[in-house]
Amino acid sequence: MGKTIAQKIFDAHEVDRPDADVRVLSLDRVFCHEITTPIAINDLVAKQCDRVFDTSKIKAVIDHVSPAKDGKTAIQGKTLRDWVRRHDIKDFFDIGDNGVCHAIFPEKGFVRPGYTIIMGDSHTCTHGAFGAFAAGVGTTDLEVGILKGVCAFHDPKTIRVNVNGALRPGVFAKDVILTIIKELTVNGATGKVIEFHGSVIDNMGMDERMTLCNMAIEAGGTSGICEPDMVTVDYLWPYIQEEFSSKEAALAEYRKFTADADAEYDRVVDINGAEIEPVATFNYKPDQVKPVREFAGTKVDQVYIGSCTNGRLEDLRVAAQVLKGKHIAPGVRAIVSPATPKIFRDALAEGIIAIFMDAGFCVTNPTCGACLGMSNGVLAPGEVCASTTNRNFNGRMGKGGMVHLMSPATAAATAIAGTIVNSPLFSEK
Amino acid sequence: MKNFNGKILFLDRSDINTDEIIPARYLTESTKEALKPYCLEDLSLPGFDPKRDVANKCAIVTRANFGCGSSREHAPWVLEYNDINLVLAENFARIFRQNMYNCGMLAIELTADELEDIFSTFSGAEAEVETDLEKCIVRISGSGKVKEYSFTLGEFDRALVEAGGWVAYADKKY
């Protein structure tokens, strides 16, 4: 019997089997941010085991509340900062260099096909876009990861999602993943890996693949995974050219982590890409998804473009295409948060930031803040936000607020209209 | 080992997420103790009042996919610091479930039919649970009735509960 991508990665990293179904894996990366890591650090200090398993495999960033908004978040930042200095962890991104974790770590070349990655953040599944097994974990798993470089997982059952055909113009990765979550439901992939295949995925760039894998957790998935291909190698090339004689050699190495033709799947889902249309969420669960055209007249108070889901350059380019020469509707406030300093600089150089500002957007520094209602765009009770983020849970962006998840194109069009509408990039025909 | 016996809090809904168990606005706390007053503060469930209903409970009985959403271990911690160390559900989000066992707490899966039986027999009045880890049985009593439900507990999960969590377990082994 053949193997799935996750099974191959598990086989290459197994250090123990404490149970018939459970495997303890060695870790290639432990990513850390300032919200979930400090309690692990404090616990290690209290237990007198303030050590790290490998400083080169640990990467850290301050991103959730940046710059600190109050005394408590200042302490969280300081705890992480002091720890990084104490252990001489080189790859640390503090204010000025910092970006949203799931955007900045891939951008720095830290993610490779076949890697095992954990982070105290549920959207760690994003990094599966590179053919890695990347999973969000709690603070205790993170603590053991930091100390021992291992983490325990149940054997990875996998759901294979094939998206074939071709997407219509104006339909984006966000529409694809929301359509998939609607099909799977919020509990449909619980504890399982979602492998994405098909011509639609093959034609996606890395930014779009990250959008796709980012929301695997919203169907309960442990990790989303795309097969590594030449798109992956092209993205990584600046970081791996010393290791390989050619891109073809890199690809040959990474193709070890592709699924076998006779791999065993828990479930196979086939979706026709040509039938996907722009969608958005309603109500409080990410599987409550319907076509944008069914939202006619739904007014919004705020539009937010950013986050680990849709704050990358490709997202800002698409939004700017819709916004160019236009202005946001009266009564609407709009925020764009480029996910990393590099994305910010590139967007400046391409004139994208000017388009956002001319349209009336507030441009913030890279941070997760608004997505989870911590800072930089919190909603008041009764307010409605059109958002490119990943969760529409009750109170997510502020107590009593309503969040509609959508693509950057739809969010930009909604900012101009003041109500949730399709972007002109999409034509119903 | 933690205490798994005592009064039950019934939460009759599926897909209760971690933002409902502990909203992100409290993730700025640097100690687990500080989370205690905010348990289930944003839960949307008609008739539920966190100020009134959480106190003096030791277990939660709920439906499917409990703890979905964020990876925040603050969710099991806020339960732990309110003396709730046991959750009975049809299934759990992976990260939440692992976090429970990593803290030496119990996330026990029962079938939808068994949970329906528990809700229809016991909810709406005071009920208690008694957990027998040897026999893998939960005994629920209330309104003059007593019923038993068996569950399975994996070898690794049991070892974590007995060790008091993953840090203690891993420290000995790896």
Image (cartoon, helix red, strand yellow):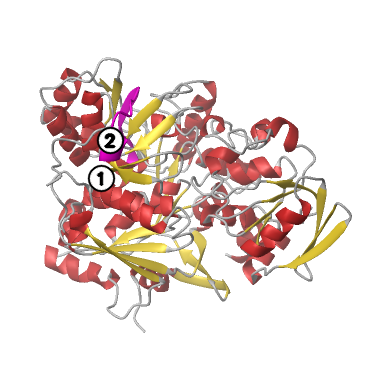
Q: Nearer the viewer, residue B27 or A208?
A: A208
Q: Is residue A107 above or below residue A112?
A: above
Subunit ID for the residue under disc 2: A
Residue A340 numbered mark, or none: 2
Mark 1 or 2 closer to N-term?
A: 1
Badge 2 element: loop
Q: Nearer the viewer, residue A412 or A309?
A: A412
Residue named by callout 1: A107
Q: Is residue B143 visible?
A: yes
Q: Quadrant of residue B102?
A: bottom right
Residue furthest out toward the right: B144
Q: Label 1 is found on which chain of the structure?
A: A
Taking A107 as reference, is B140 above or below it? below
Q: Amino acid at mark 2?
A: Thr
Q: CB under 8 Å between callouts 1 and 2?
A: yes
**Whether residue A246 can be seen here:** no
Q: Residues under labels 1 and 2: Cα distance?
A: 9 Å
Residue numbers of the magenta segment: A293-308
Q: In which quadrant will I find the N terminus of chain A?
A: bottom left
